[in-house]
């Protein structure tokens, strides 16, 4: 639907292709989207895919505002990936 948020629409691609997970987690923590405990839990995941999946399963389920912040961070940290997905 037109209402579908960018990060929901491109969930699978983002899980597979986001590479700068550490800085993204740092910014989510700074923006209070996640707390220290969840930051540590997500950071301990073995792969980038598992970390992004954990972000989706946790804070992104909470509110659209969290998705907006995640999207803004992605645009900053992964500009070429976001440009590619926005072109599709």
Image: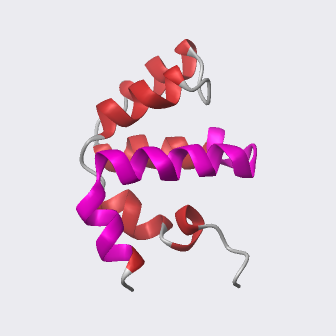
The residue lying at 53 percent from left, 13 percent from top is 36
- In the image, what residue occupies the spot 59% across and 26% down? 34
Q: Which quadrant, please, contains the C terminus?
A: bottom left
Q: What residue range appears in magenta?
A: 59-85
Check residue 72 for magenta coloring.
yes
Name the outermost residue toward the top.
36
**Taking 82 as reference, is 68 above or below it?**
above
Name the dominant secondary structure of the magenta segment: helix
**Image quadrant assignment for residue 43:** top left
Q: Nearer the viewer, residue 65 or 43?
A: 65
Q: How many marks?
A: 0
Residue 66: horizontal and vertical position, in percent? Answer: 65, 43
Say which quarter of the image contains residue 37: top right
Task: Classify 75 as above or below 88.
Answer: above
- Res 16 quadrant in image: bottom left
Depicted 72 relative to depicted 24: above or below: below
Residue depicted at 32% across the width and 70% down the height: 83
Q: Position of residue 57 (x, y in %)?
A: 61, 46
Image position of 50 (left or right of 33): left
| 23 is within the stretch colored magenta | no
Q: x%, y% of residue 30?
A: 51, 21
- Which residue sits at x=52%, y=46%? 70
The quadrant the N terminus occupies is bottom right
Q: Position of residue 79 (x, y in %)?
A: 29, 57
The type of colouring in the image is secondary structure
Q: Which sits in the foreground, 39 or 27?
A: 27
């Amino acid at each position: 639907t037109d209402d579908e948020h960018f990060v929901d629409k491109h969930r699978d691609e983002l899980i597979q292709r986001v590479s700068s997970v550490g800085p993204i987690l740092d910014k989510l923590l700074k923006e209070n989207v996640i707390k220290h405990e969840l930051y540590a839990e997500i950071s301990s995941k073995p792969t980038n895919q598992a970390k992004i999946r954990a972000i989706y399963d946790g804070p992104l389920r909470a509110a659209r505002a969290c998705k907006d912040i995640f999207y803004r961070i992605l645009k900053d940290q992964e500009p070429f990936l976001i440009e590619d997905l926005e072109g599709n």
